Amino acid sequence: MRILDRYIGGVIVRQSCLVFLVLVGLSLSMIFIEELALVGSANYTLGSVLRFVALSVPRITYDMFPMIALIGAILGLSSLASGSELIVVRASGVSIARITGAVFKIGAVFLLAAIVLGEVISPWSESEAQRGRAQDLESSINHNRVYGFWMRDGHEVVNIREVLPDLSLSKIRIFDFDQDRRLIEVRLAEEGRHHQEGWRLYNIKKTTYLPHGGATEETFDETDWDTAITPQMMGAFMITPDQLSVRQLRRYITYLRANNQDLRPYELALWQKLSLPLSTAVMVILAIPFVFGSLRVAGGTGRNLFIGIIVGIFFYITNKAFGYIVLGYEAWPTFAGAMFPTAVLFIVALLMYRRVA
């Protein structure tokens, strides 16, 4: 039976790889065309475009993973059915439940792959993609993964350790130089927020260096910051909540809760992150009733492929739309916005499976 598991799994993986090449390739082509319009701006070159597109592959793959799994599983099982291999397997005494077990195993592999992609690879690659793109488009800013953002603002040099998803700044250092490039003042701020009147710094320690040696220190709870830096400049370096890992989302939700700020967009992103691997596994199982329900139907492969594409697209759109709807109605829990489409899909898969089992 291990031979059967490996054979079915191999066919599904091969077909899923073909689906990956087609779907992700189409998305990358559209991104490439959009980014070409920016070539020539500041330091943004064709090489910058290719780097951005390459680093976008994990994010696009992660977003499309359930659809890739569904269509790949349908194509894999349909190819076995069209070659009468499934019929031979069934005639040899192998039950649908046993074949389902083989599909379950490859579904578990897809689930683990989705977790690794969403928690390790995609957050890192998306951060690098946005950092490189923004740095090439805004040549006055340099970003280092360890020390944060460095930029020149008039006679000041500014270092910002982190830009949070609400565009607030964390761990800010401002070095003020005179005309002779002598350091005259350093300000260290724990946090910076942009209001209608401009930036405001919080929990500041100010060190002033005297002309003939020595220094004085002052502390402030908050103060205004006169700077040419805008939230739009900082936003170019930020990745959206749905591109953060579960660990990063939990950390930021804790921060927002401590500061009595709106958690719902980030809670929704967290639940959607947790539900996507489950959606991937359910999609693989959903392929079984599609194929076994049309074993003796002429043109079954084309029909199954068409239905699989429609179901995949419908689930993708519904999942996104339902999340936005939940955010618009505060009485609805964010858990429902992320899990409801997956739960409905799971129930549909069970009902369809019972008809063929």
Image (cartoon, rainbow, N blue to C red):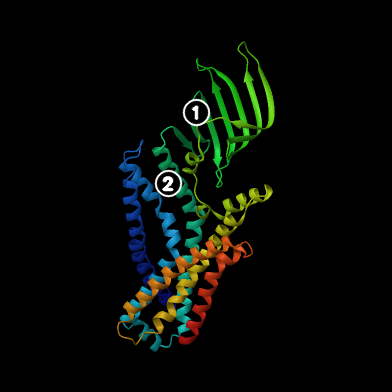
Identify the residue at the far front of this view: 197
Determine which of the numbered discs, if any, sits on residue 153 in the image: 1
> How far is disc 2 from disc 1 in space, using C-alphas?
25 Å
**Which sits in the foreground, 185 or 284?**
185
Image position, residue 119 (x, y; %):
52, 55
Q: Is residue 73 visible?
A: no
Image quarter of the N terminus? bottom left
User: What residue type is disc 1 on?
Assistant: Asp
**In the picture, residue 175 is in which quadrant?**
top right
Question: What residue is shown at x 48% (from left), y 28% (from top)?
Answer: 152
**Which sits in the foreground, 301 or 139?**
139
Image position, residue 323 (x, y; %):
53, 63
Precedes in sequence: disc 2 or disc 1: 2
Within 10 Å of disc 2 (Cα), the crowding (few <14, some 14-19, many 20+) is many
Image position, residue 354 (x, y; %):
50, 85
User: What residue type is disc 2 on?
Assistant: Ala
- Are discs 2 and 1 less than 8 Å apart at CB? no
Q: Check the image and report above or below for 11 versus 233.
A: below
- Mark 2 lies on a secondary structure that is helix
Determine which of the numbered discs, if any, sits on residue 129 in the image: 2
Question: What residue is shown at x 37% (from left), y 50% (from top)?
Answer: 54
**In the picture, residue 292 is in which quadrant?**
bottom left
43 on left or right of 253: left
Within 10 Å of disc 1 (Cα), the crowding (few <14, some 14-19, many 20+) is some
- Mark 1 lies on a secondary structure that is strand
User: Which mark is nearer the camera, 2 or 1?
Assistant: 1
